[in-house]
Image: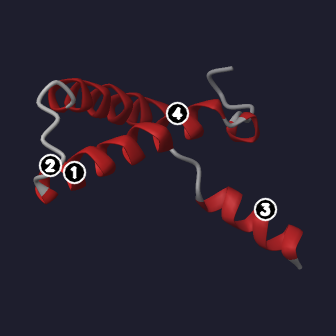
Amino acid sequence: MTNALRSRLGDYYDPDPRATVICLLGSAFTLAMMLPIADLANPYHAFGVAGTTLALLGSIAILVDPRRRRGTERD
């Protein structure tokens, strides 16, 4: 049952690599702008840094995942 659920979710969850690259570049740029300020005493700044870091790591994980690469018409 677990394998059936995983394959079903894998069919529905197939992220677009171009959108992931856009998210990766945007979050990297935002993080590069936020880190020199480094006002971690401000909770809004700390939340922004944490959220941007999670978006960056999530984008990298999606792009690196070898199971995501499937044969498409472009290949």
Residue located 29% across and 34% down the image:
27
Task: Report, in whole angstroms, how far the alpha carbon at label 3 lies from the one at label 4.
Answer: 22 Å
Give how far across and how far down residue 19 sits, in percent: 38, 36
Q: Earlier in the sequence, mark 4 or mark 1?
A: 1
Q: Is residue 33 left or right of residue 54?
A: left
User: What residue sits right under mark 3 in the picture?
Assistant: 7
Task: Report, in whole angstroms, how far the alpha carbon at label 1 lies from the one at label 2.
Answer: 4 Å
Task: Report, in whole angstroms, how far the alpha carbon at label 2 lies from the one at label 3.
Answer: 39 Å
The image shows a total of numbered marks equal to 4
User: What residue sits right under mark 2 in the picture?
Assistant: 45
Task: Report, in whole angstroms, how far the alpha carbon at label 4 lies from the one at label 2.
Answer: 23 Å
Amino acid at dot 3: Ser
Amino acid at dot 2: His
User: What residue sits right under mark 1 in the picture?
Assistant: 46
Task: Report, in whole angstroms, how far the alpha carbon at label 1 lies from the one at label 3.
Answer: 37 Å
The reply to whether dot 2 and dot 3 touch (C-beta < 8 Å) is no
